[in-house]
Amino acid sequence: MIDTVVIATDGSESVTRAVEVALDLAERFDAAVHALYVVDTGEVESSPEALREELRAALESQSSEALDSVRDHADREVVTAVREGHPAPEITEYAREQDADVVATGTRGRHGENRFLIGSVAERVVRSCPVPVLTVRQLDGEADGDGGD
C-alpha cells in the first residue's frame, strides 16, 4: 500500500514527467503528496563569493516556481517543503521524516546530465533512500518541445 508519495523536484523541464507519473500513482492509491525542493548549498558554495547571495536568492525563487508547478498539476493537496543542503541526503532524510512509501524523481536535473545516464542526484537517492525510488525518464524530445513523436 502506498500512503505517502514524496516528489523531489528541481524545477527543471526533465522533472515534469516524473511529477505527472508520481501524481498519477498518488491518485491511484489516494496517497498524500509531498513536494520537496532542495537548495543545493554545494552549488552555492562553489560559486564565486560575490555571486553567492544572488545565486541563493535565485534558487529560492526557483523553489517557489518548482513547487507551484507540482501544485498546479495536482488534483489534491500537496504539502511542500524547501530544504537547504546537498540534495540526495536531504531528499533521503525528508522521506524518512515523512514515513514515505515512495520517492519520485526525474533522471536528469537542471545540469542536463547525459540523457543515457541517470542523474547523479537521482542515483545517490536510489542508493541511499530506505524506501523505493521511482525514477522517471523524460521521453526523447520533451525538453526541446518537439513532443517526442
Image: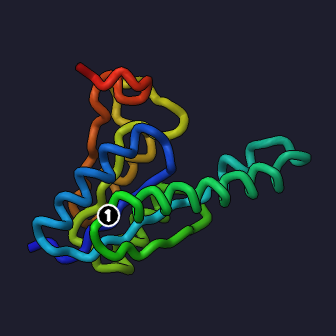
Number of numbered discs overlaid on the protein picture: 1
Please provide percent x and percent y for residue 105: 34, 51
Q: Which residue is mark 1?
A: 74
Residue 34 position, x and y percent, is: 37, 71
Q: Is residue 91 above or below residue 145?
A: below
**Could you say which quadrant of the image residue 128 lies in?**
bottom left
Specify whether 109 is left or right of 122.
right
Q: Could you say which quadrant of the image residue 48 lies in?
A: top right
Q: Residue at x 17, y 66 (%)?
A: 27
Residue under the point 31% across and 71% down: 33
Residue 99 falls left or right of residue 44: left
In terms of depth relative to the viewer, which is nearer, 144 or 116? 144
Q: Is residue 8 above or below residue 95?
A: above
Of residues 146 and 52, which is closer to you in this image?
146
- Could you tell me which residue is drawn at 85 percent across and 46 percent down? 51
Residue 141 at x, y = what percent? 34, 22
Which residue sits at x=54%, y=60%?
38
Quadrant where the image shows the N terminus: bottom left
SS of the residue at dot 1?
loop
Q: Which image quarter is the C terminus in? A: top left
Extreme residue in the right direction:
50
At label 1, which amino acid type do we have? Ala
